[in-house]
Amino acid sequence: MACFLVPAAAGIVTTVFRKKFPEKYHIKWFNTMIWGAVLALLVEHIWHGEVVPWPPFLTAMSSPGDTAAMISEMGHIGLPMLIAVFLVWAGMVLIYNHYIAPESKTKTAQTA
């Protein structure tokens, strides 16, 4: 229904404020991952007819009962998806900053 809106909201915030994040956090990685997930979910929802090109765009918003289910889905599916992408990104940044980046600096210093 609309689970892709939760990661999309996070993607909008991190894309708008990307220059505010220090380089060591590799926010571009997060943005790439989150927008890829949003795009995949959007295509899936369009394929199943849950997102349409006419108002109200989300078929779940056509009735109050469906809207309540949509809000519930956003909390039960969209939020865990956002957390999963965040944790994978955080793991990538941690591994890169602690293991890969120091190793590449050492190799550069040895060749100079």
Image (cartoon, rainbow, N blue to C red):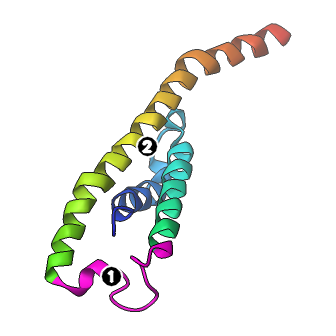
Q: Please tell me whether mark 1 or mark 2 is closer to you in this view.
A: 1
**Outermost residue, front side:** 48
Numbered disc 1: secondary structure: helix
Relative vertical location of residue 65 with respect to residue 108 in this rendering, above or below: below
State the image coordinates of residue 83 (x, y, percent, origin top left). 34, 43
In the rendered structure, find residue 59 and report the number of the disc placed on it.
1
**Outermost residue, top side:** 110
Question: For the stretch drawn in magenta, what is the main secondary structure?
Answer: loop
Label 2 near label 1: C-beta < 8 Å? no
In the rendered structure, find residue 91 and report the number of the disc placed on it.
none
Identified by mark 2, the residue type is Val
Q: Number of labelled discs?
A: 2
State the image coordinates of residue 90 (x, y, percent, origin top left). 44, 33
User: Residues under labels 1 and 2: Cα distance?
Assistant: 26 Å
Q: Name which residue lies at 16% across and 71% down.
A: 68
Specify the quadrant of the image occupied by residue 58.
Answer: bottom left
Q: Which residue is mark 2?
A: 85
- For the N terminus, the quadrant is bottom left
What segment is highlighted magenta in the picture? Answer: 46-63
Dot 1: few (<14), some (14–19), or many (≥20) neighbours within 10 Å?
some
Q: Name which residue lies at 51% across and 30% down.
A: 93
Q: Residue 47 lies in magenta, yes or no? A: yes
